[in-house]
Image: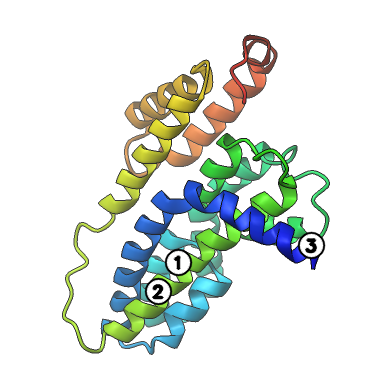
Amino acid sequence: MENKNNFISAIKAAFPHTVPVMTGYLFLGISYGIYMKVSGFSFLYPMLMAITIFGGSLEFLAVSLLLSTFAPLQTFLIALVIQARHLFYGLAMLEKYKNTGLKKLYLIFSLTDETFSINCSTPVPEGTEKGKFYLAVSLLDQSYWVTGATLGGILGSFIPFNTEGLDFVMTAMFVVIFIEQWLKEKKHYTALIGVFCSVFCLVIFGAESFIIPTMVCIFGMLSFFRRPIEKAGGFE
């Protein structure tokens, strides 16, 4: 009973930090479910894909992959390229997810862009076990996406819906998370490194292929300047 109460406390502590994610995931998840439905799939498809894949951009792409000819190797390579940025997220979370026991298995699976942003930048509340706090954030974020995708799949049978332009929701959500992190930090070295690397790689590689080079650049600069940043209090 004590463990259950502790986890409920972790959920309560994590929820306020996930509100921006809830807004974006529910809205975009509904549009994804509707997109699946109007493409000819039952609501079970977006629901199950939200549970097992849990990768927004990959799930949207999976619609066209499911409608195309069977090509497992091509599908694997596309999925690897799209989700490759999570390799860098994982490296950044090694220390934070250390000593979390079996929870680590789910934490690894559920590490999306938004969950990474929260767990990486948010201090664990006093009196809350870090593993349970990270687990609560991850579970809440996935529950928002699964709920949105399922509702969209059901509503898609009754409501005509245009999904054009809804990807801006994710951009707006990232802006909110970035501003929140900026206001919390005493120093802004890590945020400035992220902005610099993003702009630099966007100019060099273009909008279609700058994500992975940006991740490499950020990881390299944070690793190189780790000691000076820590000394100045730039890591929370």
The total number of labels drawn is 3
Q: Residue at x 42, y 21 (%)?
A: 196
Residue 152 placed where, x, y %? 33, 77
Q: CA distance from mark 1 to mark 2?
A: 6 Å
Circle 3: residue type:
Asn
Circle 2: residue type:
Ala
Q: Nearer the viewer, residue 167 or 206?
A: 167
Establish if 14 lies above or below 51. Answer: above
Q: Nearer the viewer, residue 24 or 17?
A: 17
Q: CA distance from mark 3 to mark 1?
A: 26 Å
Q: Residues within 10 Å of mark 1 (few under 14, many from 20)?
A: many
Q: Residues within 10 Å of mark 3 (few under 14, many from 20)?
A: few
- Of the numbered discs 3 and 1, the one sitting upstream in the chain is 3
Residue at image mark 3: 3
Q: Residue at x 44, y 73 (%)?
A: 147
Residue 139 placed where, x, y %? 59, 62
Contact, CB < 8 Å: mark 1 with mark 2? yes
Circle 1: residue type:
Trp
Q: CA distance from mark 2 to mark 3?
A: 31 Å
Q: Say whether residue 194 is visible.
A: no
Residue at image mark 2: 149
Q: Residue at x 33, y 86 (%)?
A: 154
Residue 221 placed where, x, y %? 58, 21
Q: Nearer the viewer, residue 205 or 83?
A: 83
Residue at image mark 1: 145
Query: Which type of secondary structure does the marked residue at label 3 adopt?
Result: helix
Judge left or right: residue 21 versus residue 139.
Answer: left
- Of the numbered discs 2 and 3, the one sitting upstream in the chain is 3
Establish if 3 lies above or below 20. Answer: below
Residue 53 placed where, x, y %? 54, 69
